[in-house]
Image (cartoon, coloured by chain):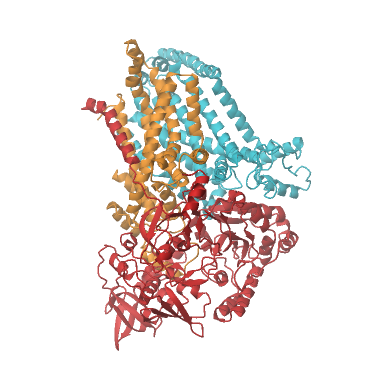
Chain colours: A cyan, B orange, C red
Amino acid sequence: MATSSSATQHPAGGTSGTSQPELERYARLLDEARQIKGVSLGLDAWRRLRRNRVAMISLGFLILLSLLALLTPFLPLQSPIEQHPQDRQFLPPRTDGVSLGLASINSPDEYRQRFEQLFHKRNGFDHLLVRARLAIFGDWTIGSLFGTDELGRDVMARLFWGARVSLIVGVVATLVSLVIGVSYGAIAGYMGGRVDNAMMRLVDVLYSIPFIFLVIFLISIINEETISARLQNYGINQITTFYIVIGAIFWLTMARVVRGQVISLKNEQFVEAARTIGAGSFTIIFRHLVPNLLSIVIVYLTLTIPSVMLFEAFLSFLGLGVSPPNVSWGLMANDGIQVITPVKIYWWLILFPGLALAMTLFGLNFLGDGLRDALDPRMKDR
Amino acid sequence: MVLTLWIVFTVAFFLMRAVPGGPFQEDRKLPPEIEANIRAQFNLDAPLHEQYLTHLGRAAQLDFGSSYKLKDFTVNEVIAQGFPISASLGIFALVFAFTLGTAAGIISALRRQSWLDVSFMAMATLGIAVPNFVLASLCIVLFVFTMKLLPAAGWGSLEQIILPALCLGAPFAAYIARLTRTGMLDVLSQDFIKTAYAKGLHPRRVILRHALRGAILPVVSYLGPATAGILTGSLVLERIFALPGMGSHFIDAATQRDYTLAMGMVLVYTLLLYTMNMLVDISYALIDPRVRLD
Amino acid sequence: MQHAARRMFPYIALVLGLGAVTYAVSFGTLPPADFTWVNETEIQSVDPQKVTGVPEGRVINCLFEGLYRFHPETLEPMPALAERHTVSDDLKTYTFYLRPGLTWSDGSPLTAEDFRWSWMRFLHPENAAQYAYQLYYVKNAAKYNVGELAAGDSVEVEIDDRPPHPSGREQLFPRGTILRGTLVSITKPPEPELADGLSEEDRADALAQWKQRWSYEVEIDGSSRHFSKSDLDGNQRCRHVLFDYNHVGVRVIDERTLEVTLENPTPYFLQLMAFYPLYSVHRATIEEHGVPLWTKPENIVSSGPFQLQFRRIRDRTRMVKNPRYWNAQSVAFNVIDALAVNSNTTALNLYMNGQADWITDVPGPVIPILQDRADFNSQPMLTTYFYRLCVEKPPLDDIRVRQALNLAIDKRIICEAILRAGQVPARSLVPPGLAGYEPAEGAERNVERAKELLAQAGYPNGRGMPRITILYNTLESHRTIAERIQSEWKKHLGIDVELENQEWGVYLDRVRSLDYHIARAAWVGDYADPNTFLDMFVTGGENNETGWGDPEYDRLIALASTQSDPAERMATLHKAEEILMEELPIIPVYFYVSKNMVRPYVGGFHGNILDRHDIVHMSVDAEEKDRVLEAEGIH
């Protein structure tokens, strides 16, 4: 059970009426306790996690994926946006590719123009990576191993560039929802009574708003030229608004789950113990309750990132997703199902985006499982 | 409740009017006089707050007026035709998701780390990981055109509901399986289960009567959002399978600025979610002995 | 109590669940139809005078009929409810003779008066028909519809005494007491001052309210009376003061003879008689049930080959044969279904699975594969896909920039590589294939020339060119084409173009308020004549939407409408199109083709440039159908 270890973990809040030397003794004791605990919790979990092979593979995969996504411009891939409608349409996977035709250009003007044809506008970091790539690989590219699409664009290159958008949307939106959801739910659950009632009533109201309408409206308002120009001034583009909107929607479930969990936890002994030694509400919630929610929060986290990514795909299906030349996995999957028909199936257009989505979400889920097992103090005895 | 509906109504009303574009815009522009005639006919020329009050008053009497786009029907008729279909689809999907999900979850938890657990969870993860429109397309190819077992689309027979309900329920079944497994593992590690085993109770009884009750809590609290998700998910599936439910009305009413239909839809959806969440709260209280009934 | 509730809960939940499942699987079965087609979206209404869409047209052409009906192959107007017509020497007066013994589906006689009344309803401002302008060719019809009056006009005043309608909603018909007389004057209160910042809609609303307070002095039977739409002292309250419908060019000679007088010779007027907004509707039904209740299956009375049996929203519209149709013996089907299916992938699935006999569209990517099939029926259509350029926005105000943009697009690639259904690259606005008209084609693709022009305009290699945006509404192929054009402009001209995807309502709003640089557009010919395309771009035309205008162009279009010699008229229109193709406020991209899939056992289906196919001409060979479906393994 968690109670004994948790209780020692919590420092005393207000110890009024105790003498100075006693206080110091307490402080020393608590300091020691904290040190021991701090080391053991992290290391212990890590040790347990390392024993879980599936989780480690997932973790490795996710790290690799993030690195690849970050370094996409450096990889010798073809252009994700240049079209070859005449001769490279719907090609099944093959080993030949289209060379970039960028390395030999000397005039900066022409270089810039060709660059934007190939990669659209990019920031300085990406420019640097492309330079590095040209220095190492020259114009050489990997062949169209995943085939080409309706406009003759290389599917593999699009997958890598799409990974950047999809991953960022998933992670950032989830973090937004996590921060809001956990603090909101924990506070409501702990406070109970009227505060809880009022806070949950608000969640109920928000819950009952069909958010798909909100998203449609918000996206069309944001896309208005005057508004989008104003947002652009603050450096906010469509994708940024995307994950803020999505994140703002997904916190509700998190808040409810956390609240439910807090309610069943708050009558447990360790909370009573913390309260007896005079810890304030804030301390109890964020130092004592929230760490105990970690397992359930992580489970939801590993489930929320996928659902955010799926929501992005859903919006793409409705034609409200990211707009070209940006590309996301959802957009690609939607392009893919357009070509699943009874007369002809261009399988590579649905298989590879689907696989990329599925593998990422697989990884996230298994990693979540592993983390959960590793972090849950209640599993210690077994 | 009334407060919720009112807030939703107000937010939706003004949000919808804030978006550029009106309900009667067609491909070709009309002479201004004809446009004025149309606007007058639908009372769109009144000041916004007056329109708001008129609509609110009517909505309070459950009269949402005529649809702007489906001109032969009132909003109530559209809802009356679409709701049973979406409801059937949703119920089917939920029942399927719940049964399959909990069963798989329990088995996984009991046979932890076995090949059964791993393959169940792999399938569950796949269910969560694949967008339902991709799943639906694959199912159509497989069951309709390769195996020629089921009709491709449409509504009216049991055969026609199977495929959309399966595709709709799949991600939720997967989600529920995971939640059940997690919850089950949580509960199984607790003292009262150990006590129950120690008392010599039959393992099946321990699991079904004691463990399941605690393990199912997260699932129950998930049913509320699941309903919402199923309603949203049915937007996609109703489109792919050409089902005449409410889902496709949602999107079309919003994108075509069918103000009256959109308002009606928002309120029905709101009511539905609210009821479902309330039911979930009640069930939660009924199942979890730790929550006191007031 | 608590305990009981807890114990009962699983059982209650179980019972509820079972009940729900039972409810969910309780279906009624539906007998299959003789012929089923996928009619794209759910139709807005079956009221011919309330809708504008193509899917609506397919259903309305089953339920109702006009004086004429198109020949399924040549589109020649063939006598339908009318058996023949005569035209006066000045080409301005048409006299239609109805068939003897025509009846409505309830058995009541169908007469010339039905048409006169229906067109009155169609034009009445309160009916607010979007297509009302289709009848503006008829003398004074526009005046009646628009409601603008001048002193001396003959007017009809509708007194505010309409009987309350049993449907509980206010109805236009039956109307209140109608008084006829001559307008003496209109007394207007001072015009409201409108602030500059007002939106177009607010402005229109303010003006409408102002018009409510006008006072009309009308001389009726020698005495002068005052009317107003609001309660003004000394005025009688009225609903409408309109131009007198008796002075609109529609006259009933006798039960079977209808005389129509036009403003100008209109060579395509007969085609309009086969166009559904001008079909007649049943007055007694509308007056009894009102709108929209008269369209309910239990109320509706129709005149066409089929009657409405029921409508399931977004599922199907089912129709059955109308035994009282004048030509009922040649109608092949007893029961037909129009399915409402939004996605064309789903439509193709239904077709391949034998659930539909005819689909009107197929998904783009599979067209190359379908093209080899005998049942894929593709025909050039009277529809042009083009880009509007907002000529008020720099740099598009420079004709050289517009020309350069046009010259740099490879339209052939767009047709062959992206669309791939035999679409034709467009160098003119008017599609080819109209009898007697030679489209005025603009310059051919020429990248070098485009570069020169752009340099002359001050943007060599695109340097210094302001950012421009292509606006399109949400649809896969619009995006693909825009991407293609974007990359071509980038490649050849060095211009940065942004793409902007908007859903339909927003897109329309932006185009209308000229709040765009370049916007995707398409125009479907309403009738088989170049005028349906060219009169769009007269200065300030409602559908111009580019800010472009040219006095010579306006003059030519106006001239053509008064010319009675077809060859001369076509030559004038050709000259006008030449101007358009030189000035390029629009860039034509391609001409559409129809993409029908029809099962080989369906007879009477022909391709035509309007892509119009009336079910009344079709039939199904039942044995062949069984054979074909059997062969494909569909039961």
B243 or A75: nearer the eye?
A: B243
Residue B140 picture location, percent across and down: 50, 41
Q: Going by the picture, which residue comes out furthest to the bottom?
A: C222
A50 to the left or right of A20: right
Q: Is residue A39 above or below residue C353?
A: above
Residue A192 picture location, percent across and down: 32, 30
B40 or C480: nearer the eye?
A: C480
Residue C561 picture location, percent across and down: 55, 78
Q: Is residue C148 above or below residue C512?
A: below
- Residue A178 visible in the snapshot: yes
Quarter of the image where one finds residue C522 = bottom right
**What residue sits 56% from the left and 60% below the top?**
C521
Quarter of the image where one finds residue A202 = top left
Q: Is residue A247 above or below residue C591?
A: above
A364 to the left or right of C578: left
Numbered-mark total? 0
Quarter of the image for the N terminus of chain C: give it.
top left
C618 or A220: nearer the eye?
A: C618
Residue C496 picture location, percent across and down: 66, 53
Q: Going by the picture, which residue comes out furthest to the left?
A: C1
A70 to the left or right of A269: right
- Residue A374 visible in the snapshot: no
